[in-house]
Image (cartoon, rainbow, N blue to C red):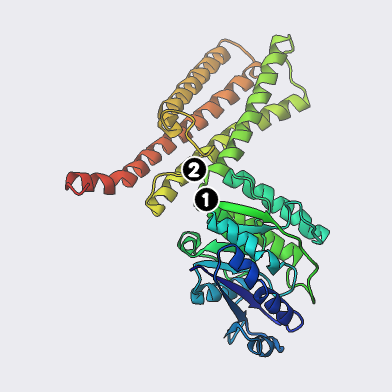
Amino acid sequence: MTTLTVVIPAYNEEDGIADIAHRVLSARDGLVEVGVDNLELIVVDDGSKDRTAEIAQSIEGVTLIQHAQNKGYGGALKTGFGQAQGELIGFLDADGTYPPEHFPRLCQEALNGSDIVVGSRRSGADSHMPPMRKLGNFIWSNLLTILGNKRVQDPASGMRVFKREALERIYPLPDGLNLTPVMSTRAVHERLLVSEIPIPYAERLGRSKLSVVHDGTLFLQSIIWTALTYNPVRPLGLIGAAMISLAGLIGLGLIITRLSGVTTLGGWGVFAVFTAMVSAVAGISTFALGVTFNYMVSIFHKQPIRQGLFGKPVFKTPLNHHFGWVGALGLAVGFLLAIGSLALGVNGWPVERLWLYMLGSAMLTLVGIQLVIYWILLRVLEELGQREMLTKQDLGLL
C-alpha cells in the first residue's frame, strides 16, 4: 500500500484554506487510480493571527499542526515533512494558486521512478503568473540549468511530490520562501531523478506574501550558494574560462594588427592590452580557485568530485595535474622576456618599444606563480582526500 502525505503551510490563509483542503481531499479517487491507496493531509498553521487554524481543524480528514510563532514557509513545510507518514510526500500552497487535482499525475510519475516530481508552471500549461514572476522564474530556471548542467523549467514551483527517502539527500533546507529553489538545486547536484509535469497556475486568493525584489534576490543567492557547495568549479570555471577566452581574443587581435604592419597603439589599443592582461590573470585565478574548491568540497562530502566543469572528465588526467608544469613554463617564458627586454633596453631600445614585452613578462610571471601555488595546494588536498582510503588499505580494511 502506498500513502501520499500532502503538507499545506498556512499563514493567515482563512480565505482559502477550506477550499484548498477540500480540493486535496477530493483527489482521493484519482490517487487510487494511479496506485496511491491512502491520502494524509497535514495543515501546518504557522502562527496565524486569523481563523486559519480554527477553519482547518474543523475539516474532517485534516491533521492540524500549529506553530506558536511564525517559522516561515520552509519551516512550516519541514514540520509537516517530519510528521508525514506517507512513502510519498507532496506539498502546495494554501492560496489556491496550485491545482491539487494534478497530484495523481505527479504521484504516477514518482511511482514510475522519479525521485522528485515538480508541478511546472513554465511547461506549456495555462498560467496566470504575474509578468514579474515570469521574468524571475525565467532567470532562476536558466541560472540553475547553467550551474547544474541539467534543464530545469520551474525551480521555484511550490507544488511537488517526492519520495520520502529523498529527504536525507536534499536536507538541510532553509526556513524561508527559498526552500523550493534550494530543494531543486540540491536535487540536481545530488543527481536525483527530477521530472516536471505541466500544471496550470491561478491567481492567489488574498495578498501575496512574496516580495518580487527581496525574495527574487534571495532565490538567486540561494541557487548560487547552494551550487557552490556542490560543484564550485562549474560557475567559477565558466567565469574564468570566459575571461581567459577574452584575453586570448584580444591577444590574437594584437598579433594580427602587428603582422599587418601597425606598430603603434592608440588609446583603444592600450585599453585592450590592459583588459587582456587583467582578464588573463583574473581568469586563471578564478578557474584555479574553482578547481581548488571542488577538492575541498569533495573532502567535506567524503566522496569523489561528482560533477566538474562539464559534468564529466574532458582529459584523461585531471587538469589540475598540469598546473605545475604549465606554471613553471609561464615563469620561464616570463623570465626570458624580462631578460630579453632588459638586454634590448641596455642596447638602446626606447621604452616605447619595450613596454608591451615587459607587461607580457609580468603577466606570465604572475600567472606562473599562481598556477604553481595552486598546484601545490591541490596536491595537498588530494593527499588529504585519499588519506582515509589509503589508511584503510594499509590496515587491510578494504
Q: Amino acid at mark 1?
A: His
Q: CA distance from mark 2 to mark 1?
A: 8 Å
- Residue occupying image coordinates x 37% and y 44%: 381
Of callouts 2 and 1, the N-terminal one: 1
Q: Residue at the spot x=39%, y=45% of the render?
A: 304
Closer to the camera in the image, 320 or 162: 162
Q: Position of residue 143 (x, y in %)?
A: 66, 48
Please give the label number shown on residue 307: 2
**Residue 13 in sight from this viewpoint:** no
* Left or right side of 134 for 307: left
Q: Which mark is residue 117?
A: none
> Which residue type does callout 2 highlight?
Gln
**Residue 255 percent across, percent down from the top left:** 66, 16
The residue carrying mark 1 is: 189
- Residue at image point 80% right, 68% down: 203
In this view, 354 is above or below 114: above
Label 1 secondary element = helix
| Residue 125 at least partly seen | yes
